[in-house]
Amino acid sequence: MQPEHSAETPTTTRQISLASRPHGAPTPENFRLETVDLPEPADGEILVRNTLMSVDPYMRGRMNDAKSYVAPFRIDAPLDGGAVGEVIASRSADAPVGAHVLHGLGWREHVTLPAAEARVIDTDAAPASAYLGVLGMPGVTAYVGLTVIAGMREGETVFVSGAAGAVGQVAGQIAKALGAARVVGSAGSPAKIERLLELGYDAAFNYKETSVRDGLREVAPDGIDVYFDNVGGDHLEAAISHLNRFGRVAMCGAISQYNATEPAPGPRNLFQAIGKGLTLRGFIVGQYPHLADEYRAHAATWLAEGRLVGDETVREGLEGAPRAFMDLLEGANTGKMLVRL
């Protein structure tokens, strides 16, 4: 088919490439902003002007040259990740010019890709940014962790670490929507604690002002049944001590260790899992693609009822993406960290 254009299309674009692999916390020198040629779409392809891109904690692991569940970023090649944008040229009937799409090639202002690798989204039903947050990967992650991995049941007490982040905010709200009797969380500032209470958390503590063990004991004096782990380290150790018999841990992330230069020690009290009959289970949301539509059906109802809200921290410009990512790893965001392009 002949290409469909919205206007004169650009022949070049800007992107962020990985200049070098970080040792410890990433620095600006690990990133490079560059201008590259932009190919015209071939049959079945679309040209997208990205409007928003996501930065996520898992990207830190991809900056290392290590075998994992997803391939590492390559030196001198563009980084990638979730993004939404508008189709400005198309050779696919599935994604015409003017359509808004979700895809996995962020960290650049424009991209040419097969239409089959993008999903058309309805920006009348929800803002485009929601498809990177509450209706996107963070929301599905929270849902999978609570329902499939932890098997949360009505009447239970749930603890979420990193509760003010994109996944943590949604996890707490989903737990309440699914009938948890008490939902508690941890975060790193008084403002974040206040926001968690506004979102329906029953209690929360600032891990920078008290030990996790003491904070957890205060907000959940009768113990916890489910721990949604976004942090690892001292949070996981404290949760193991505070879990009730047959408690479950959904191991989603360990952001406290992502910039570590030496192997982090494991929980010193793991032996307690034996006597308590605990279950600790890790997961990757991509292993459960069949649950995405199930979650979105629930989320549409919860959003309409006002039971699900997702905060956003938005930075401006592609050149600001590296700083947004570095700040994310330091906890500078409340809710989803996005970059507007």
Image (spheres, grey):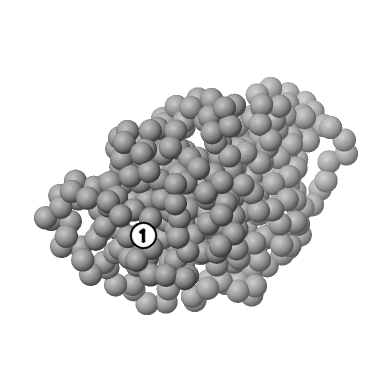
Q: Against 130, is 230 above or below? A: below
Label 1 environment density (alpha carbons within 10 Å; few <14, some 14–19, many ≥20): some
Say which residue label 1 marks: 218
Q: Against 144, is 323 above or below? A: below
> At which x and y percent is residue 43?
68, 30
Q: Nearer the viewer, residue 123 or 14?
A: 123
Q: Against 95, is 338 above or below? A: below
Furthest-left residue in view? Answer: 275
Q: Nearer the viewer, residue 329 or 29?
A: 329
**Number of numbered discs present?**
1
Residue at x-position 65% and y-position 72%: 28
> At which x and y percent is residue 29?
64, 75
> At which x and y percent is residue 173?
48, 40
Furthest-right residue in view? Answer: 8
Q: Is residue 255 visible?
A: yes
Residue at x-position 59% and y-position 43%: 310
Residue at x-position 15% and y-position 52%: 276
> At which x and y percent is residue 243?
25, 53
Q: Against 314, is 290 above or below? A: above
Q: Is residue 70 left or right of residue 315?
A: left
Place residue 306 in its image quadrant: top right
Q: Nearer the viewer, residue 45 or 66?
A: 66
Q: Is residue 67 visible?
A: no
Question: What's the residue type where badge 1 is placed?
Answer: Glu
Residue at x-position 70% and y-position 30%: 123
